[in-house]
Image (tube, rainbow, N blue to C red):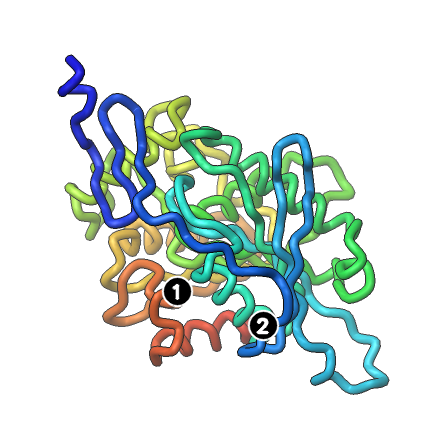
Amino acid sequence: MESHADEVVIACDAFRIYRSGKMDRLHRPARVPAGLDPATGVTSKDVVLDAGTGLSARLFLPSLGSRHPSSSKKLPVLVFFHGGAFLIESAVSPLYHGYVASLAAAAGVLAVSVEYRLAPEHPVPAAYDDAWSALLWAASAQDEWLAEHGDLTRLFLAGDSAGGNMVHNVLIKLASFPDPAPRIEGAILLHPWFGGSALVEGEEPAKAKEMATIWEFACPGAAGGTDDPRMNPMAPGAPGLEHLRCERMLVCAGDKDWAAARDRAYYAAVAASAWRGGSAWLESEGEGHVFFLEKPECAKAKELMDRVVAFVAGS
């Protein structure tokens, strides 16, 4: 019995999941101190959003020295949700601190990178709850940086992988939130993680099964497994995509990414729906899942960053 419970059901570079429900994180990321980032000129600080749950965020403020001294123009505010299968990673890890600092500098945004609770210690929907709370906190401009430098009429959501999934779910929840709800100008879904029990064209069966196991581990209460509407936005009974509460959306994938088939299907469904926003698609040729985090200096990562910057600017 014990040996069966100790059987590894998912093994990857970052973690192992056992049949017993235990998980080992194999590489705990270092914590990058907040402060001035010399490479980008961006200054960061950490803010506790909810002492009761431990929810916090790292804020990134681009250098104001590059702006004209008489400029009183405020910066768009971008709320970012990191990836990691709801199980690993952090807003303050080298990977995500570096990426969001670079994004803040390139796009000229005040970024709020959310340090949400992770499963299995805090099963999903804790991450969704934290994402929602972080958006409402950012939109309220309680922090002095947001109040002084943030333009809350230009609010963006962005996230990669599981974070891209969280962006979708926050947009859907906004539809049922009483006005005045935060107005989201744009949503950026970078290689978002979606699933479903029925394969879509181009989806690899073994990888789909592996990701379904991870989802059901992170969200043991999922209704219908990967057909839970939070994981499968096109599942029967899922909220209609016409209810997405943003004005514009950019969906990105890599053509060698295990998530690409689902991302294409999601984008096609959004574009074909009665949603009245504007949608855009970018597929990075020859690249895999969230390649831009590991290879930020490669040509395709720079192309992706340029597209994100242009999207924030309004094109």
Give the residue number, with chain letter if any, for mark 2: 37
Q: Does 278 sit above or below residue 124?
A: below
Badge 1: residue crowd in 10 Å (few <14, some 14–19, many ≥20): some
Q: Quadrant of the N terminus?
A: top left
At 46% across and 31% down in the image, what residue appears? 124
Question: Horizontally, is 174 left or right of 8 in the view?
Answer: right
- Identity of the amino acid at label 1? Leu
Residue carrying label 1: 293
Closest to the observer: 218 or 249? 218
Can you tell which mark lies on residue 117? none
Q: In the image, residue 233 lies at what x, y percent?
A: 42, 39
- The answer, for residue 33, to whether it is visible in the render is yes
Residue under the point 57% across and 49% down: 114
Residue 202 placed where, x, y %? Answer: 20, 52
Q: Residue at x 82, y 64 (%)?
A: 148
- Give the answer, above or below, for where 219 lies relative to 234: above
